[in-house]
Amino acid sequence: MPEAFLADVRVIDISMLGPGALGGHLVDFGAEVIKVESPSGEYIRSMTWPIIHDDHGSNSLLHLHVNRGKKSLVLDLKSDEGRDALGELIRSADVVIEGMRPGFLDKIGFGPARLKELKPDIVVCSLSGYGATGPYRNLPSHGVAYDAWSGVVQPVVDDDGFCRIPPQANVGITAGPAFAAMAILAALIRARSTGEPAIMEIAQSDASAYFDWYRIETERAYQRSADEVTGNASDDGERRAAGLAGMWEGVRYQFYASADGHVLFMASEKMFWENFCRGIARMDLFERWPGSTYADHARGNTELHGQLREIFATKTTAAWLAFADEHNTTIAPVNTSASVIDDPQFNDRFDWVGAGSLGADQLLVPLKLAGESLPIPGRAPDLGQHTDEILDALTQDR
């Protein structure tokens, strides 16, 4: 078996909560990631739900996932001894991750100049809520804040008139570590080829906004004059609302109830629409509403909408997927986070590592490699589990 991609990379991880996922990404590709914790430990172990109870005590799934495979080193960074040990550790490292409030490394005496003095080709990445600049940089915050700020998540109002957080995926808290990991890998390539260090920072709010670039850039484009920026030709040039908001009136691209759930119909290209109509023996629908070659959703066509609603209700979701495969047309299943784990496509693409190894069933990075596989990470560490091992090794290296 070939060596893991990052087998010779050492990462010092000084982070809390969601930003810890950054080090977790690097662990998944084989890096040694040393999580530096205070003597009291990080409270991520008790944060959010669910909580897993076993021989290691009570730990949150959040901790078990984002800190899997890391080593835990306890250092009191308020003491000279703790900071000296951190300095020695940085000399041995390739990457330093900082996931605290902006300015933390400077505060404890490890600003950019000191870091480059300790390791001239060091790669340093800070990941915070709102970043190190701007009027919000010092605001305490949690994951939903970044998506609320970027416009990804909007409040919903319940039957009693109370605003509620809708049930949807967090973007910024997930995309921030992923973007940061990509930047670290790019910086590592340069550092190893040129010896140049990199000091960089990214915000989880930045990541949420950039993840939603299509809607944001659409709104920006619509600030230009109507003759410079129009809608699609299939809409007669009419400007649709940005992103999925512009899909509301769609008919050939829309959700439909099946006999046992829902499907997403996506026949916005004439070829797929024709294939669908031929497959259900309803070429009359195609002849009456053939549509444009591309991106024609038959917006607002309530008559067609009603007919398609009746048609899709006649088959189960599985039957419609088989139909789509047979007739080369565009139909997708609609899952929830609960049902997707039983989906056959999900089970083909993802691998689980069981609770016996990691404390909770966890998904591995969905990367398919020819002739090799990613390393299986170990369980998230107990507080201080590797302190003696790491400090003894540093002493021997002096």
Image (tube, rainbow, N blue to C red):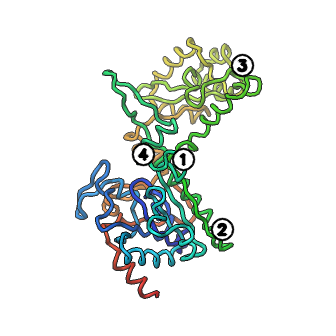
> Mark 4 sits on what residue?
143
Of 348 and 89, which appears nearest the observer? Answer: 89
Tag 1 or tag 2, which sits nearer the N-term?
1
Q: Identify the residue shown where x is 39% and y is 39%.
A: 339
Query: Taking 243 as reference, is 304 above or below it?
Result: above
* 201, 373: nearer the viewer: 201
For discs 3 and 2, the disc positioned in front in the rendered view = 2
Q: Residues within 10 Å of mark 4 (few under 14, many from 20)?
A: some
Q: Do the CB atoms of the residues marked 2 and 1 lie less than 8 Å apart?
A: no
Upstream in sequence: badge 3 or badge 2: 2
Q: Would residue 59 appear left or right of 131 to someone viewing this image?
A: left
Tell me if 193 is positioned left or right of 134 in this view: right
Badge 3, how many Cα within 10 Å: few under 14, some, many 20+?
few
Separation of marks 4 and 1 at Cα, in angstroms: 18 Å
Residue type beneath disc 3: Asp
2 vs 1, front mark: 1
Residue 394: horizontal and vertical position, in percent?
A: 43, 82
Q: Amino acid at mark 4?
A: Gly
The secondary structure type at the circle numbered 4 is: helix
- Residue 376 figure quarter: bottom left
Determine the secondary structure under disc 2. Answer: helix
> Residue tagged by mark 3?
236
Residue reaching furthest to the top: 303
- Kind of residue at disc 1: Gly
Residue 40 sits in quarter: bottom left
Above or below 201: residue 34: below
Camera-side mark, 3 or 4: 4
Indicate which disc residue 134 carries: 1
Q: Nearer the viewer, mark 4 or mark 1?
A: 1
